[in-house]
Image: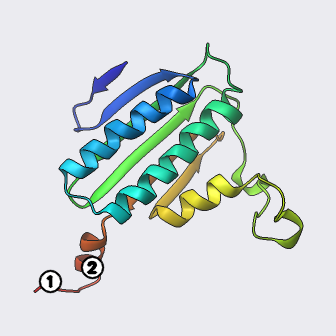
């Protein structure tokens, strides 16, 4: 189900199905392209989004197709915002092992959160840990915010 919200954001409610996750990524990618986001920005957003939705389906909802995932996003000229909420009990991001420490290099856990934090400007896990919000400030907008002037 797709809903347009008064603030210009769009919300999707999907079952815990990885194919549905791909469909949302394609919709968002199309909107980013229409808003003239750069390929590098789109790549990072898509990767972070995939990690967030897959984690919600696999870890949050435990692949239970009776549980839903809520994805709400907004594409603005200067930034992209997205929230992903699952119906699981949540997690504490401080309990996720650091995938870059020597003892965890062979373990797969924690890499999704690392990728999200790398590619997005802001990543917040909201208590109890079943809702995550992310934003990406556009490169051109970040330059203007730092006092750089485009000529």
Which residue lies at the image location 27% right of the left edge and 79% below the top edge? 143
Task: List the single residue furthest toward the top.
Answer: 66
In the displayed structure, 91 sits above or below 122; it is above
Q: Residue at x 57, y 47 (%)?
A: 51
The reply to whether discs 2 and 1 touch (Cβ–Cβ < 8 Å) is: yes
Q: Which mark is residue 150?
A: 1
In the displayed structure, 30 sits above or below 61; it is: below
Residue 79 point in image, percent of width and height: 30, 58
The mark that comes first in sequence, 2 or 1, is 2
**Residue 143, disc:** 2
Looking at the rendered structure, the number of numbered marks drawn on it comes to 2
Looking at the image, residue 25 sits to the left or right of residue 100; the answer is left
- x and y percent of residue 57 in the render? 62, 31
For the view shown, which residue lies furthest in the left direction? Answer: 151
Q: Could you say which disc has been placed on residue 80 in the image?
A: none
Q: Which element is circle 1 on?
A: loop
Report helix, strand or loop for mark 2: helix
Q: Residue at x 30, y 74 (%)?
A: 142
């Amino acid at each position: 189900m797709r809903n347009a919200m008064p603030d210009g954001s769009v919300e999707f409610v999907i079952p815990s199905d990885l194919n549905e996750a791909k469909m949302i990524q394609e919709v968002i990618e199309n909107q980013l392209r229409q808003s003239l986001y750069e390929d590098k920005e789109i790549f990072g957003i898509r990767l972070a989004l995939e990690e967030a939705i897959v984690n919600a389906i696999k870890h949050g909802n435990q692949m239970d197709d009776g549980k839903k995932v809520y994805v709400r996003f907004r594409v603005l000229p200067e930034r992209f915002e997205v929230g992903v909420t699952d119906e699981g009990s949540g997690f504490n991001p401080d309990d996720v092992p650091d995938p870059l420490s020597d003892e965890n290099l062979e373990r797969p856990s924690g890499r999704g959160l690392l990728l999200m934090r790398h590619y997005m400007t802001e990543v917040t896990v909201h208590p109890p840990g079943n809702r995550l919000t992310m934003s990406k400030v556009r490169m051109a907008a970040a330059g203007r915010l730092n006092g750089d002037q485009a000529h």
